[in-house]
Image (tube, rainbow, N blue to C red):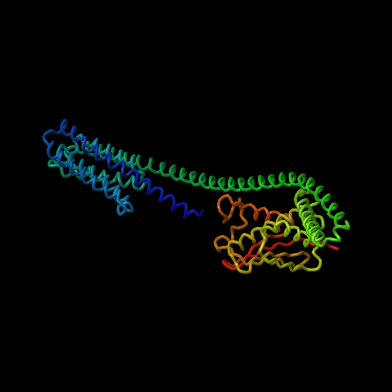
Amino acid sequence: MSRRQTLLRYNQALHDLRIAHSKTGCLFSISLVLLGVGLDYGMYPGHLKEFFAARLLIAGLTLLILLAILSKRGQPHVRSLTFLWLALPQMMIGWMIAVTDGSASIYFVGLQLAFFGGSMIIPVNHLEGLGYGLFTDIVYSLACYFHPGGIQDSGQFMSNLLFLSFAAVISAGAAYFTELGRMRMFSLQEQVAAQNDALQKTNTALAEVKGQLIQREKMAALGTLSAGLLHEVNNPVNYSLMAINMALTDPAAAQSAELKESLTDAHEGMQRVQNIVSDLKTFAYQKPGVDSQRMFLLEKAIQSALRLTSFDLKGIEVDLALPQDTHVMGDEPAIIGVLINLLSNAAQALHRAGREQPRISLRGEHRGGRLWLAVRDNGTGIAPENIGRVLEPFFTTRDVGAGLGLGLSVSYGIIQRHGGLLSVTSEFGAWTEFSFDLATPQP
């Protein structure tokens, strides 16, 4: 943040502080002005009525200023309004000095107390403090000058004037150091706020990383569980295939076309189950960091992902356009996971769009020693305001409970770990394309 911005924020904070203190100060001033009737009664009972009327007038004017400060139109002028209500008691006390004993009036003390009270309540800088003190000196001088007897005791007058001047200098000095302290305090508050913002961002990032780690741990645990289950499933599948093959060689099957057709369908179904089990075993035995850069066929990984998402892809045309050689280097189970995520997201987008001819195309080509693959669907597309966020952890446009929003961010991390980049382009309402690239074996 620039120094100019900091200064603007400080001035705004000081403005708000003036408003709060000025409202309190107005109420405090009104109370003291009215309570001063007791002093009038004890010191100058002969002026009680006129002093009481003056106090009511000053209290009423201060109340009007308070109402102005409370209004939206008055708040921009709070500085001027504050010094106006500060001046009112001073002028009233000055008039009381003039009509009583002049330089010998005991109300000189009231003038000084009012000055100190105003300086302490209202946040002023040293120049404003000096100005307020000079104004008080002028009020006292004029009060003594316009006293019917004039300045009768010049020594006392000068002593009192010096006391007021000393008070002004002390107030200005105190205001200077108070202002420095206030500015330092504000600077510290700004630093603490900035550090809190940075800490909040760090905590958010850590929470996102924690979420990803939890998700990966869940996937690893699911993979371990699936591996054991698939091993158990594979055995009866093999037994069933052997039994069906034996049944197909039986003479009864050759004599009955209906029986042979049923056994053939069962054989094809069990082979499909065997293929799915094989694909799941490849995906389930994922071991991050172990053989993560072995060679495999990307086309085979794509076929596995298509079989594993076949339920989601029902009714969707899938076009595949790949180069002749699809050998790549990497972690095959992890790449299958990425492809499953991209195909599932594309299928969901197509189901939401309700296209007459839903289609997903996968096309690959060699670019600079790497194999590039793009997965495009003609679904709903991505809104412009979301295109920059789809790869962020926990960002999702699905309904609550339909997903954590981690799939794409985890996929992004997997491709990044392979030295590639998962990117997205889209035309809202028309299509979406995710693409990534993998290293190819070098001769």
Q: Position of residue 343 (x, y in %)?
A: 68, 60
Screen quadrant of the C terminus: bottom right
Q: Which of the 4 image quarters holds residue 256? A: bottom right
| Residue that lies at the very extreme toward the top in this rendered image | 42
Please state the total of marks drawn on the protein image. Answer: 0
Q: x, y (%) of residue 363?
A: 72, 67
Nearer the observer, 294 or 320: 320
Residue 89 placement: quadrant: top left
Q: In the figure, is residue 8 to the left or right of 230?
A: left
Q: Position of residue 408 (x, y in %)?
A: 65, 56
163 left or right, relative to 198? left
Q: Position of residue 179 (x, y in %)?
A: 41, 44
Q: Is residue 150 visible?
A: no
The residue at 74%/44% (across/down) is 225
| Image position of 396 with respect to 119: above or below | below
Q: In front here: 137 or 427?
A: 427
Q: Is residue 242 visible?
A: yes
As drawn, 321 above or below 25? below
- Residue positioned 28% across, 42% down in the render: 26
| Between 3 and 400, the one nearer to me in the picture | 400
In the depicted view, which residue is nearer to us: 217 or 224?
Answer: 224
Q: Residue furthest left?
A: 46
